[in-house]
Image (cartoon, grey):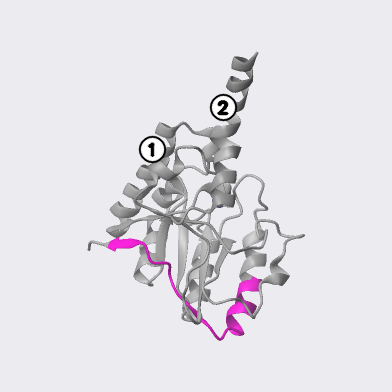
Amino acid sequence: MKKWLALATLPLAYTVGATLYARIKKPSRITRSLASPNTVYLTFDDGPNPYYTPQLLDLLKRYDAKATFFVVGELAQKYPHLLRRMHKEGHAIGIHHYAHKSAWQLTPHQLQQQIEQTRRIIYAITGVRTHLYRPPWGHFNAATMHIAKHDYVVLWSHIFKDWKATHNNLHLLKHPIADGSILLLHDNGDTKGADSTAPSVMLKALEGFLATATQQFLALPGEDNEC
Ligand SMILES: [Zn+2]
């Protein structure tokens, strides 16, 4: 009976247990904010998207704001010109798995493949070896911290449910916002559970936020420049 109980508990420990440990215990390699005076970090997940990402890059350029893009490897492969543009315009690029899959569905070997394949794609396109990693949905499995042992695992200080076109919390995207905050937004609405037009709502809210900002917006540190 005890053996069965242990076996039934194992998958929970591998998935939910590992995620709770990462979120509650807060190991030092997990970043939620930085001690950076007068600076806010914008991060965008799930892209690149051929329709919304160029609009976002235009907007960031207009306000001289730098950001960090946690890209999906298979989309980066599909739209390499968007990664080249991100890099050229001073943004940082991080890993958000090759496909938008939760670490809960992945064996340690599959998780490693998701991360390393995306790292290689980003390197092939931009010449930059990134050490920035954000797990989709913020899900960890028991192997995550070991596999990403040379990476900065970046979560967030603020999340706005901006993958929804309505009933989001984008009204909370406003000043004042604490120095060093890491804001999580999305430049692609094609992910499962998201609304496809949600990024247009996000872009509008972001424009208002940038227009009234007094702090600077910088890319997260965590890339090795090799080119
Ligand atoms: Zn995501």
Which residue appears at 60% of the width and 83% of the height?
211
As drawn, the residue found furthest toward the left would be: 227
Q: Which of the 4 image quadrants contains residue 179?
A: bottom right
Q: Quick one: SS at disc 1?
A: helix
Task: Evaluate whether residue 25 shows in this view.
Answer: yes
Residue 67 place in picture, x, y as percent: 47, 69
Task: Evaluate whether residue 98 shows in this view.
Answer: no
Rendered image: mark on residue 113: 1
Mark 2 CB in 8 Å range of ligand 1? no
Q: Is residue 218 magenta?
A: yes
Q: Which of the 4 image quadrants contains residue 111?
A: top left
Rendered image: mark on residue 10: 2
Q: Magenta part of the protein: which range? A: 204-224
Counting residues from the start of the chain, the first of labels 1 and 2 encountered is 2
Q: Quadrant of the N terminus?
A: top right
Amino acid type of the residue that numbered disc 1 sits on in the rendered structure: Gln
